[in-house]
Image (cartoon, grey):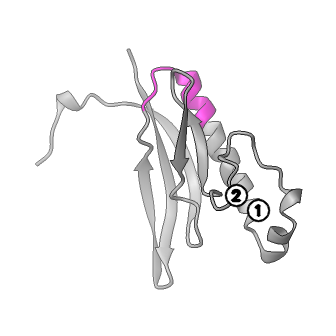
Amino acid sequence: MKKYQIIVSYETGNSFGKHDEEDTIELIWDNLDVAKENLRRIKEHYKWYKSKHRDSWRRKKEDDVPMPEWLPGKWGYDGCLILKTDDGNDYQFGAQWCGYFETLHGARIEILKDNDMSFNI
């Protein structure tokens, strides 16, 4: 049976420079449709996050930016979203691509590789 994981590509840095990162979300899915739903949530969350944090005027008009139902809904948790597990449970996840210096480039679903077939030292 195939297992799926989500890989996220983003830019991060600080006042002195920036670099690209690629991280794997720690959840693994057996159901491709659930993984696709989570991929959609990541995309929608980032659009919401960027529209909310675009500028100080927009932050003052927070009510204009509707919060998706699958966000934690607490003040200060803008960089978090709720992903679904295969069994339908919620998993709150901190999106490391949400921050002052961060920019999301994209995300993709990959088939999990069998780690029993290789190793590195």
Q: Amino acid at mark 2?
A: Tyr
Residue 30, position in %: x, y? 45, 21
Residue 3, position in %: x, y? 40, 24
What is the crowding at mark 1: few (fewer than 14 residues within 10 Å), some, or many (at least 20)? many
Residue 96, position in %: x, y? 50, 58
Q: Which residues are magenta?
A: 28-38
The circle drawn on residue 3 is none
Height in image: 78 above or below 12? above
Task: Residue lying at the far front in this picture: please name it.
Answer: 74
* Label 2–label 1 contact, CB within 8 A: yes
Mark 2 element type: helix
Height in image: 35 above or below 14? above
Mark 1 element type: helix
Seen in the image, is 58 located left or right of residue 72? right
Q: Which residue is mark 2?
A: 49
Q: Of helix, strand and loop, which mostly describes the magenta segment?
A: helix
Height in image: 120 above or below 34? below
What is the crowding at mark 2: few (fewer than 14 residues within 10 Å), some, or many (at least 20)? some
Residue 86, position in %: x, y? 51, 23
Residue 19: quarter of image: bottom left
Residue depicted at x 89% and y 58%? 64
Q: Nearer the viewer, residue 56 or 13?
A: 56
Q: Nearer the viewer, residue 8 or 71?
A: 71
Q: Amino acid at mark 1?
A: Lys
Q: Which residue is mark 1?
A: 52
For the residues labelled 2 and 1, the Cα–Cα distance comes to: 5 Å
Question: In the rendered picture of this protein, how many numbered marks are placed on residues?
Answer: 2
Residue depicted at x 54% and y 54%? 95
